[in-house]
Image: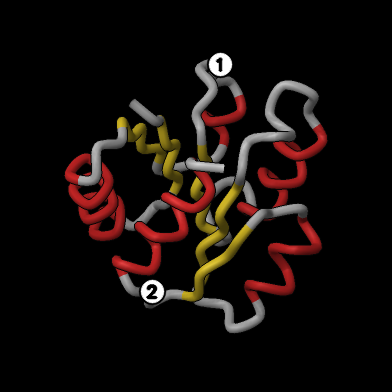
Amino acid sequence: MKKIIFVDDDLGITDIAKLLFERAGYEITIFLKGAPLMTHHELPDLYILDKQLPDIDGLEICRKLKSNKHTKSIPVIMLSANPDIKRLAKLAGADDAAEKPFSLAALRSMAKHHTEE
């Protein structure tokens, strides 16, 4: 079973993500803040990160993941209400990005694409 780590402080989004990805056959771990992720040692097949978190900017987390030898090859999808998220995510090293509000089907498709490569 493919594993996703999903980081977002919006409980509505995390509840929907949990339901969406579990129904699609993924194991999903949710974090509401970025700091706990930085000490989490179980590696997923995919990270999905919100840009705007209460403690650490998601783009900074992405840069850290992509500069770490253990996590640099794991795909990262960035989420944000920022209309410039695709450009910002690319600069941070993310593999993909979606602007909020996003289509659940599009997010599921994006996740599938990055976990089946």
Q: Which of pointers 2 and 1 indicates the residue nearer the eye?
A: 2
Q: Quadrant of residue 86?
A: bottom right
For this view, does 48 lie left or right of residue 101? right
Label 2 sits on a secondary structure element that is loop
Q: Is residue 82 above or below residue 47?
A: below
In percent of width and height, residue 62 lies at 68, 46
Residue on which disc 2 sits: 102
Residue at the spot 57% in from the left edge and 46% down from the top edge:
55
> Number of numbered discs present?
2
Residue type, numbered disc 2: Phe
Disc 1 element: loop
Q: Nearer the viewer, residue 91 or 3?
A: 3
Which label's residue is closer to the chain start, 2 or 1? 1
Mark 1 surroundings within 10 Å by alpha-carbon count, few (fewer than 14), some (14 through 19), many (20 or more):
few
The amino acid pointed to by label 1 is His
| Residue occupying the point 82% across, 35% down | 67
At which x and y percent is residue 33?
Answer: 47, 42
Q: Is residue 21 above or below residue 101?
A: above
Residue 109, compared with residue 68, is above or below; it is below
Specify the quadrant of the image occupied by residue 104: bottom left
Considering every residue shown, the one lying at the far top of the view is 41
At 49% across and 42% down in the image, what residue appears? 116
> Which residue is disc 1 drawn over?
41
**Where in the figure is residue 82, as x and y percent of width and height?**
57, 78
Identify the residue at horizontal 35%, vertical 57% (top origin): 108
Q: Is residue 55 left or right of residue 89?
A: left
Q: Which mark is residue 66?
A: none
Q: Quadrant of the N terminus?
A: top left
Q: CA distance from mark 2 to mark 1?
A: 29 Å
